[in-house]
Image (spheres, rainbow, N blue to C red):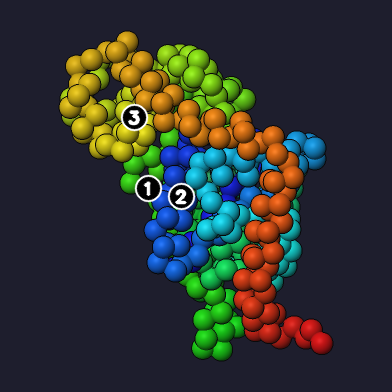
């Protein structure tokens, strides 16, 4: 098994990232490396330049994100932890795959449509070709499994389509690239904003009240949960009673995912109660679960030399794994390299 996944270092790690993806990264690291497989986790800093950004912030966010991932349980001795910018094979393979990806496929990507909005003419070319770089990220390592939240499923389907077309067109009967499978958690695949149950929790939401950051202290977490948007009804005892109540469903989903319980079990306990009782219980659960991560993060983020050393070492290992596949892709395309 080879597990590969990435995160953009564009701000704080939030609860959606943690429950949707990072917790699975840690679980897979523990299971897969014990069985002799490999896990590669990276900071998608090349993806981050597809939208307007402040260079100094990108650099400091990249180091902070390393600290956050290690604080969550990613062990740089067992997993390969690196940033794309130190592994140029990602950008190289993207260019090779640009010959295979179709404009029509990219035009259908919902993230492109959402992020470009009405201003497609003014969007960067990088925002449009973003999913091709994402395909390169996983195909470069012959990834078999890619743990992500629901919102990345479409990008991974595209990676599979690119792999299949490349293999068909240039493989000469051989598989140049492995088809990766997305691993999406059953609970918490899509954590929503605390201010709007129809929008996903996101780093780019201008309101900090919309998300729980893994760096938030206990008072901030409690305040955000207490101010979370809800409806006036008490909680139902059955899951079907959450239909049409997106904010209530989101909070119950967060509780269940964090406690490692089913939503049915949470509702069996809190059904009939109002949010006046449920919100403090949720706030306490979050504070208790996130406190150790927060404490480790605060300690780790101060040691810039150690964080840079983690990335440097990870990039070295990643490059060694990337080169054979990249060489095969060049050769398959008939590109002469001396
Ligand atoms: P990014 O940085 O937006 O998010 C990182 C991971 O967190 C998940 N996630 C969520 N899960 C549940 N609920 C949410 N509200 C939520 N918000 C984010 C994402 O699904 C993701 O798994 N394009 C990717 C980064 C990337 C990548 C890759 C991922 C680049 N190359 C290759 C996998 C494989 C992104 O922007 O994720």
Q: Relative to 242, say whether 108 is above or below.
A: below
Comes first in the chain, label 1 or label 2: 2
Q: Give the quarter of the image for residue 198.
A: top left
The residue that appears at 59% across and 22% down in the rendered structure is 207
The residue that appears at 38% across and 39% down in the rendered structure is 188
Left or right of 33, for residue 187 = left
Q: Give the quarter of the image for residue 79.
A: bottom right
Residue at which label 3 appears: 255
Work out how far the residue at label 1 is from the one at label 3, CA to CA, in angstroms: 15 Å
- The numbered disc on residue 310 is none
Q: Nearer the viewer, mark 1 or mark 2?
A: 2
Q: Relative to 170, say whether 109 is above or below.
A: above
Residue at which label 2 appears: 26
Tell me where residue 20 appears, x and y as whole percent: 44, 43
Comes first in the chain, label 1 or label 3: 1
- Confirm or reject: label 1 Cβ below 8 Å from ligand 1: no
């Amino acid at each position: 098994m080879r597990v590969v996944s990435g995160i953009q270092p564009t701000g704080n790690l939030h609860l959606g990232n943690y429950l949707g993806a990072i917790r699975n990264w840690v679980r897979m690291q523990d299971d897969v490396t014990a069985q002799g497989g490999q896990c590669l986790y990276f900071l998608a800093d090349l993806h981050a330049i597809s939208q307007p950004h402040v260079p100094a912030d990108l650099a400091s966010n990249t180091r902070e994100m390393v600290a956050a991932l290690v604080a969550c349980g990613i062990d740089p001795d067992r997993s390969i932890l690196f940033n794309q910018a130190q592994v140029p094979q990602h950008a190289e393979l993207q260019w090779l795959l640009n010959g295979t990806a179709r404009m029509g496929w990219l035009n259908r990507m919902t993230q492109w449509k959402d992020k470009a909005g009405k201003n497609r003419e003014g969007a960067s070319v990088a925002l449009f070709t973003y999913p091709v770089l994402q395909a390169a990220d996983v195909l470069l390592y012959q990834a078999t499994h890619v743990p992500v939240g629901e919102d990345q499923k479409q990008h991974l389907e595209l990676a599979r389509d690119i792999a299949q077309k490349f293999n068909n067109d240039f493989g000469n009967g051989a598989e140049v690239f492995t088809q990766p499978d997305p691993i999406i958690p059953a609970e918490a695949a899509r954590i929503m904003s605390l201010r709007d149950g129809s929008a996903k929790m996101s780093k780019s939401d201008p309101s900090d009240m919309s998300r729980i950051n893994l760096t938030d202290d206990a008072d901030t977490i409690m305040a955000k949960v207490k101010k979370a948007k809800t409806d006036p009804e008490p909680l139902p005892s059955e899951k079907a009673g959450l239909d049409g109540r997106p904010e209530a469903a989101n909070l119950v989903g967060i509780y269940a995912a964090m406690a490692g319980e089913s939503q049915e079990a949470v509702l069996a306990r809190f059904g009939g109660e109002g949010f006046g009782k449920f919100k403090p219980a949720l706030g306490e659960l979050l504070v208790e679960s996130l406190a150790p991560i927060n404490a480790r993060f605060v300690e780790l983020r101060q040691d810039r030399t150690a964080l840079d050393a983690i990335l440097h070492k990870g990039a070295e290992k990643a490059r060694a794994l990337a080169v054979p596949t990249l060489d095969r892709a060049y050769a398959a395309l008939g590109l002469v390299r001396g």
